Amino acid sequence: MSSQLFDVWNWQGKVGRTRYLISGLLLLAIKHNLDRLVAALYGYPWRILNYWVSDIPTGIANISRREASFYALLIVIALPFIWIGTVLTLRRLRDANLPLWLVPLFFLPFFNLAFFIILVAIPSEAPRDREQLSSRFARWIPRGEFGSAALGVLVTAGLSVLITTLSANGLGSYGWGLFVGIPFFLGLNSVLIYGYHQPRSLGRCLLVALLSTALVGISLFAVAIEGLICLIMALPLAIVLALFGGFIGFVLQQRRSFSNQSLRVVSVGFLLMPGLTLLEYSIGETSPVYAVKTSVVIEANAQIVWSNVVSFAQLPPPTETIFKTGIAYPIRADIAGHGVGAVRHCVFSTGEFVEPITVWDEPRLLSFSVSGQPPAMEEMSIYSDLHPPHVEHYLISRRGQFELKALPDGTTLLEGTTWYQNRFWPGVYWHLWSDAIIHRIHQRVLVHIKNLSEHK
């Protein structure tokens, strides 16, 4: 290797894809082992997925001083690697004749992996004309704008449906590969096929990416892979990522003489989509436990409120739109026994939660574990027997509690808390949905307890 490769203070010059690959893998190995050593000193586990998946479910503001010290040290260690990675990526972009402003992709979780592989797949820019570079596969791609767009949409959407079926129904995996990898490569690959023979406009590239995403969603609904509500929840994330992938495809297809290498990048994308899904499934990352707390002030004393917390009569039919879509909602609560060891049954629209009491501190605290729970929802579908794997055992309630605090004015502050796991990734996106749903469930119960207590 030339000495220029190790001149980490100068981002001028170029780096070929082989040197970029070797350097990237070497730097990752060094950094990962340094991080593992630091984590071991602090008594924490450290896995390769920690670079993409956060282990701080409660948020950065709630970590302990020891955890803050640990993560601060990791950041200090990362600084030289960030600099070297940025310098090498700038040189690789220059060598591939790609815009240098693409370097921020180096800092985006998950995308930096895809970005790294794409840069490894793209050869150095050759000083030859686009028309001189042909591929034996070129005859399969129509030269017309409509034909190339249709092929790009159909091929990428068809493969995406197959991989989604494998991930969801075959492996029962709803992770980064499904919700991030597939939409990104869906947009990227459809645009690269669309712009194979000649560069297309940005607007039309993004339209092709959106059409690919729409076709995948329609197909999953039509062939009974997913219901409408799950698709609607995934839609905002999928659209953003597909547009992002389409934009990267637009930038790549502007590269002079790129048509000769575009199918190589498309092939890499087609291999990465199932590859990432299988890798993620084999690692089996454990989701963190999140906590959702909701409170209400009740104009009654704590003893009256307590009696309605332990068990409560039938709730009126829901008026909230979210519960009319099939999301499970509470109906009533019964209890068998008294004190620790009693079992509370909270009946929902899809079944019942079985909640053994672990703390009975009347009239202050009622805590319980969850030994059984019903499906999280009934999917809206044209099929009556649609039961995708995520309906059960993907939104998992672990424990809950009701805490009653007597206020000076004679009223009672009632706080309901649920600790749960959400096995959908990326967690930062999906737990926004689950937090909102659990808050609405809490509010339905707490408002009912409030009405019962204030009119008793």
Image: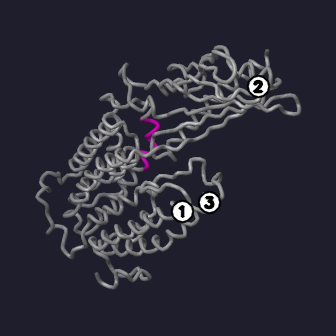
The answer to which quarter of the image holds residue 284 is top left
- Tell me, for residue 338, which label it has, or none: none
Distance from the alpha carbon under mark 3 to that under mark 2: 37 Å
> Which is more toward the observer, 316 or 271?
271
Query: At 35% across and 70% down in the image, what residue appears?
Result: 26
Look at mark 1 in the image and give the residue it sits on.
41
Q: Residue 365: give x, y in percent of width and height.
A: 73, 30
Residue farthest to the right? 409
Along the horizontal axis of the image, is 120 left or right of 71?
Answer: left
User: Magenta region: which residues?
Assistant: 231-240
Please name the amino acid that badge 2 sits on. Glu
Closer mark to the observer between disc 3 and disc 2: 2
Look at mark 2 in the image and give the residue it sits on.
362
Q: Residue 224: give x, y in percent of width and height.
A: 33, 28
Look at mark 3 in the image and give the residue it sits on.
68
73 w.r.t. 224: above or below:
below
96 w.r.t. 183: above or below:
below
- Mark 3 surroundings: few (<14), some (14-19) or many (≥20) residues within 10 A: some
> Which is more toward the observer, 105 or 421?
421
Residue 239 in the magenta stretch? The answer is: yes
Query: At 33% across and 33% down in the image, what residue appears?
Result: 169
- In terms of secondary structure, where does tag 2 sit? loop
Please name the amino acid that badge 1 sits on. Leu
> Which is more toward the observer, 38 or 403?
38
